[in-house]
Image (spheres, helix red, strand yellow):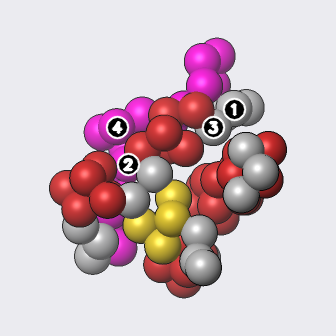
Amino acid sequence: MSLIVTMAHLRSIPGFSKTPGFCIPGARRFFAAHGLDFRAFVHDGIPASQLEATGDGLALALVAWAKESEAGNGR
């Protein structure tokens, strides 16, 4: 089963600002720049492979965080 990255991951990733999470306006711009559907992401998440395919450092960090979070949840 492939990993689905969700808004919960986006809002909880640590280490990039004083508070956890990436900003929503920046996420919207990222999705638009890469031809990805932000609304679908909000509702259903996105396969990690789609984020990895962008090659973007922040996207890769988000996927790594999602993997770490889900491993901690026993998934």
Tell me the CA gap for discs 1 and 3. Answer: 4 Å
Does the image show residue 56?
no
Is label 2 in a helix, a strand or a loop? helix
Tell me if residue 15 comes above or below residue 50 in the rendering: above
Is label 3 in a helix, a strand or a loop? loop
Does the image show residue 42?
yes
Which residue position is annotated with label 2? 27
Going by the picture, which residue comes out furthest to the front? Answer: 74
| First along the sequence among labels 2 and 1 | 1
Q: Do the residues labelled 2 and 4 touch (CB within 8 Å)?
A: yes
Is label 1 in a helix, a strand or a loop? loop
Q: Do the residues labelled 4 and 3 touch (CB within 8 Å)?
A: no
Tell me the CA gap for discs 3 and 2. Answer: 13 Å
Q: Which of 50 and 55 is in front in this view?
A: 50
Q: Nearer the viewer, residue 48 or 74?
A: 74
Disc 4 marks which amino acid? Ile
| First along the sequence among labels 4 and 3 | 3
Query: Is the C terminus in the top left, top right, bottom left or bottom right quadrant?
Result: bottom right
User: Which span is picked out in magenta?
Assistant: 17-34
Q: Are marks 1 and 3 in contact (CB under 8 Å)?
A: yes
- The residue drawn where x is 73% and y is 44% is 73
Name the mark nearer the viewer: 4 or 3. Answer: 3
Which residue position is annotated with label 1? 14
Name the mark nearer the viewer: 3 or 2. Answer: 3
Residue 36 is situated, as x and y percent measured from the top left of the image, at 29, 71
Q: Dot 2, crowdedness within 10 Å: few (<14), some or many (≥20)?
A: some
Disc 1 marks which amino acid? Pro
Which residue position is annotated with label 3? 13
